[in-house]
Amino acid sequence: MATGAPHPYFQSSAFVAGVQFLTPLLFREYSTPALLHDWILFIRKSNTVPHQAATFFPLGDCYSKWLGISAASCLFQGQGSMRAPVLLWAATTWLAVSAVAHPGRGGGGGGGGEQPLSRIAVERAVLAVDDAAHVKASPLVLGLTGENSEWVDVEFFHPNPSSDDWIGVFSPANFSAAICEPENKRQYPPVLCTAPIKYQFANFTNDGYNKTGKGYLKLQLINQREDFSFALFSGGLLKPKLIAVSNKVAFANPKAPVYPRLAQGKSWNEMTVTWTSGYDITEAVPFVEWGEKGGRRFLAPAGTLTFDRNSMCGAPARTVGWRHPGYIHTSYLKDLWPDSPYTYRLGHRLMNGTRVWSKSYSFKASPYPGQDSLQRVIIFGDMGKAEADGSNEFNNFQPGSLNTTHQVISDIENIDMVVHIGDICYANGYLSQWDQFTAQIEPIASRVPYMIGSGNHERDWPGTGSFYGNLDSGGECGVPAQTVFYTPAENRAKFWYATDYGMFRFCIANTEEDWRPGTEQYKFIEQCLSSVDRQKQPWLIFLAHRVLGYSSCAYYELEGTFEEPMGREALQELWQKYKVDLAFYGHVHSYERTCPVYQSQCVVEASDHYSGPFQATTHVVVGGAGASLSKFTDSKIQWSHFTDFDHGFVKLTAFNHSSLLFEYKKSRDGNVYDHFTISRDYRDILACSVDNCPWSTLAS
């Protein structure tokens, strides 16, 4: 080979295929394990690697080494002259992969980092019990006065401490009692079958631990239907060694009804109440006691759903991330009086006649469609969950989540509804996290309707019908999201639906299903937009998780589209034809507002106030509610009016049929950093603008 000549590999079809494989990865949300999984699969399929290589390194072994460069060692087992170019390709790919998976270190904008629980190599755990070590937890019984959340003191000692030691919180407490199935016949069954529900390093707030071996943690537990134990591990997260296990801790009634979630029903005067309990229908009958505040009480029956491990589509949801979700109950409170205050409590009638109650909650019924009154809606995406006790290192995963939750709770008296447009809790196949999330939002969702949309981290999984065949859901393939939360969709698995709130019509699309012309969803979108009576409901809002409109996020710029591919090309004529006021998106973890834009051109200049006839839709990216932030392009984009690289959310306030206030608030302080108003009469909605004038006739 001549000096300076490119290696033949880089001119081969395999290298071209590799580039084609890598390109779509760069511009999507993928967890690090998911990227590496696809990466190794490609290496295996490449015709430049001897077929025998696959027998030298089982995929499961490579996959478990995803954290750090050790993954590349899987490729050193290739043979012959192709080892060097394969390694060079692998190194190049891995650098790009790392950049995408860790946006905080200079990579793309869509990723939220890996699910913290996925850092633990559960299947590699070994027993190394040390009789001199101990873990003690107190109090033994939680929730004696009905609380569903309590703090637990955990004291521990290890005679041979190290900075890699960590405490895992397991539920059920007998976490090592299950029989684990080996991945293949050549494997021994692993010691542990399940990941902890949370963890913290032993030296967290214990500066002297590495010398004394003594430590103390204060951890928050929520009622999750089972008891708890605390385990001390050494060896770090990748080679965990079980040293000691604590006593058991449990809630007084672990099966109690908890975490109510309100949602709009299929009619304007219906409110649904969904909650979680440990009671199967063979043990107790679920219901809601409810009525107008201070008035007569009614009992409404509830339906019960659950799902099992076989409903999950892949790992970790089917393996170490599996935890029984409990029983999900939904009751329908019908024939509500508009704007009237109601109280309710959750109940279960045991087979012996005893009744188990939750505490009492309250809500305000929805206004009549078209009703002229003050109406306020919060909109955000990609919030996720976080831990108040600092466990799981969630500050690197969903750093703004608690701040957003706090700001919404603090303003709850001035909020009528919340819309969370996808990437709900980022459980990513670790099902215990759905309980954690519903507990976090309980002060919100128990008071006002909490409407959700589907995102890639709820739905996407290869071979399951999702529009994107990636691994972002961690094997959940939409099942927990559509079960834990109620939506007024005709088919809850499809996740697209319309909901009315007074003067608002919300059309919520599902970007994880095909939306292009000719599809079932496209027909729904047009029907939702076209069927609203704008004289009664002047404020028409389109919402979707991925950016189907406009975003100047850096990874969309690299893709050359400034949108989700095939997004606005399929839908912008509908938005313009039906005069959609605002289109909201998540997925990009920052805030951005455009001018009123159509076909990539500002129809009118961006402003803090719009009046007169509708001109074009204003597009808003509001995916910064909690996840790690997404970077914007450095280029000047003509239609991009305001960007904010920070966590935040939007509040819409409809004062009447003619006046709407838009406010963007930062999660850190709740203050307004961007705003505008719209003043428009009904005749302004009827007026013509670009590409939305109805046919007319010269006949009189």
Image (cartoon, rainbow, N blue to C red):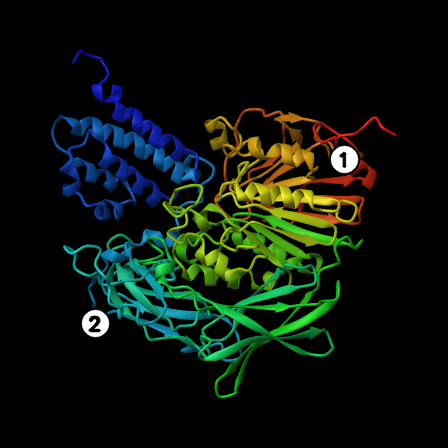
Mark 2 burial class by Cα count in 10 Å: few <14, some 14-19, many 20+: few
Vertical relation: 329 (above or below) 367: below
Q: Secondary structure at mark 1?
A: strand
The residue depicted at 20 percent of the width and 68 percent of the height is: 130
Eye-nearest disc, 2 or 1: 1
Does the image show residue 341? yes
Q: Residue furthest left?
A: 80
Q: Secondary structure at mark 2?
A: loop
Q: Amino acid at mark 2?
A: Asp
Vertical relation: 54 (above or below) 600: below
Q: Nearer the viewer, residue 365 or 394?
A: 365
Instruction: Identify the residue under disc 2.
Output: 131
The residue depicted at 18 percent of the width and 32 percent of the height is: 49
Mark 1 burial class by Cα count in 10 Å: few <14, some 14-19, many 20+: some
Q: Nearer the viewer, residue 248 or 137?
A: 248
Mark 2 vs 1, N-terminal side? 2
- Residue 623 in the image: x percent, y percent? 55, 44
Instruction: Identify the residue under disc 1.
Output: 610
Q: Nearer the viewer, residue 70 or 454?
A: 454
In this rendering, position of residue 16 left or right of residue 267: left
The residue depicted at 34 percent of the width and 40 percent of the height is: 35
- Residue 562 in the image: x percent, y percent? 53, 30
Vertical relation: 446 (above or below) 626: below
Choose top left, top right, bottom left or bottom right for residue 183. bottom left
Q: Residue furthest right?
A: 700
In this rendering, position of residue 637 left or right of residue 687: left
- Residue 638 in the image: x percent, y percent? 62, 25
Q: Residue furthest top?
A: 2
Q: Residue furthest front?
A: 699
The residue depicted at 27 percent of the width and 36 percent of the height is: 42
In this rendering, position of residue 614 left or right of residue 443: right
Choose top left, top right, bottom left or bottom right for residue 242. bottom left
